[in-house]
Image: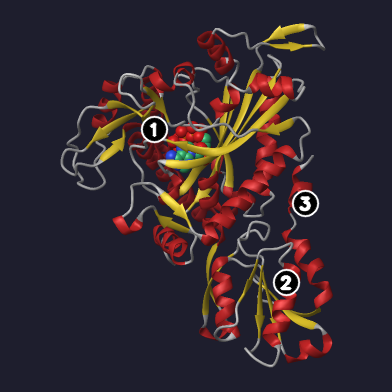
Amino acid sequence: MASQEDVFKKLVAHCKEYGFVFPSSEIYDGLGAVYDYGQMGVELKNNIKKYWWDSMVLLHENVVGIDAAIFMHPTTWKASGHVDAFNDPLIDNKDSKKRYRADVLIEDHLAKFDEKINKECEKAAKRFGESFDREMFCQTNPRVLENVAKRDAIHSRFVAALEASDLAELKQIIVDCEIVCPISGTKNWTDVRQFNLMFSTEMGSTADGAMKIYLRPETAQGIFVNYLNVQKTGRMKVPFGICQIGKAFRNEIVARQFIFRMREFEQMEMQFFVRPGEELKWFEHWKQFRLRWHKALGLGDEKYRFHDHDKLAHYANAATDIEFQMPFGFKEVEGIHSRTDFDLSSHEKYSGKNIKYFDPEINESYTPYVIETSIGVDRMFLSIMSAAYNEEQLEGGDSRVVLKLPAVLAPVKVCVMPLVKKDGLPEKAREIMNDLKFDYKCAYDEKDSIGKRYRRQDAVGTPFCITVDHQTLEDNCVTIRHRDTMEQQRVAISDLHNIIGAEVNMKNLFKRIVE
Ligand code: ATP
């Protein structure tokens, strides 16, 4: 079986070969951690965004959207804490000249203890068979206990160092744990330094009149500074939410792993404004709603888990990540945070404007508390692609690569194919396509054998292929072929809408996620 690393490499190659994702400005050898979406990728990306947007604004009458500018007044980023504290601790290996995030090096080291513990458990499970009691084993086995103790000791030093922003201690942990550079294999490290992740540029034409401004590192602040505009003009009552989809920019230190960590990416964020004291109830509510949204896609419930934060940001009183099982392990796709009144209070302080909400039900003014749900479109894209990518051996020694994308998200829903390029079949195929194209993204293909055409559609995840043959001209029936099962059915042209619609309608997913 291919290793997960090989699978990931193949996935990246597949994304390029079939027009999903290209390296940015590739003819100039690309630009680090910046990618372009191709003709297939953009459709999938748009469908993901629609699924998210509609799940917010259609399913909740108290959630509305906005589209704020990327550029914001620079004081925004002072107030949000990004100018002073949006830093990553970086460290360089002097031999390989490679740069790493010190926290990630330590986290990866910690994960190795978990791997060792898991291996011990798996070995024991095999030995003891059905009678194996994992919990008991972990509490008593000396090797497991030793690894847990080592991991916990490093972990608590690590958390304390992060909380105190103690860079010397982070370096000391790396030294004490004898962490080596994966490229050079040496322990020849520089000191740890802080690195601000915001990109800046200048606005204004004259040198002395120019103002340093930032490319937003998150979309959330555009929502905070507009919350009262929306509340007043939309006559919203707390609790209510504002959502937004848009680009964000971070000068990531370590930008590997394809579109998992990019310097320019897209976020889908919602800030939900609640009465102080009710935030943990809403935190729990949105946690569950967001997980249902993910699971409704049918990629496999076991691929998701919550990861509660060890170290809460100074403004948060609860935070969790939804992690997805990528080919390189469980990784954060979405963050759900209870941000208290930190952002709004801070904007009030820095702007000198009163941005309190008057609650008519209790006759009181207060600064609302905020629950945030924040998901990266690109990470979501990657998780869907990695779950969908399949290499299958078929009967007769044949094989195929098939993207088992959720049908609602597939870039192309239907490919219409005349069996041959003559006898009026292309005309009939066009006629069918001209009817379907108002509702579904369709493709037309008349080149090569039907088998080859099926493979091409499998590779881009098209859920349905429709073949028009000579019989069609007589009985108005076509063959519809299903991507995952490869099953073929003879159906009336007039039934196509119902068959396709039943699988690609987002409504079916929405029904699964509303309570
Ligand atoms: P990480 O710890 O992986 O850097 P984060 O905790 O800084 O992520 P948030 O600030 O919570 O991320 O951003 C919310 C979401 O935005 C993330 O869950 C992720 O999906 C997405 N995201 C953040 N940074 C990037 C990036 N560099 N490239 C692509 N997506 C990103």
Which residue lies under the disc numbered 2?
434
Q: As shown in the figure, which amino acid type bears the numbered disc 1?
A: Arg
Which quarter of the image is occupied by the C terminus?
A: top right
Dot 2 or dot 3: first in sequence order is: 2
Q: Position of residue 314 (x, y in %)?
A: 49, 17
Seen in the image, is 458 located left or right of residue 51? left
Q: Nearer the viewer, mark 1 or mark 3?
A: 3
Q: As shown in the figure, which amino acid type bears the numbered disc 3?
A: Lys
Task: Label 1: state its secondary structure.
Answer: helix
Dot 1 or dot 3: first in sequence order is: 1
- Confirm or deny contact between disc 2 and disc 1 (CB under 8 A): no
At x 70% / y 63%, what residue is drawn? 440
Which residue lies under the disc numbered 1?
151
Task: Label 3: state its secondary structure.
Answer: helix
Question: Is residue 62 visible to the viewer in this orientation of the structure?
Answer: yes
Q: Quadrant of residue 432?
A: bottom right
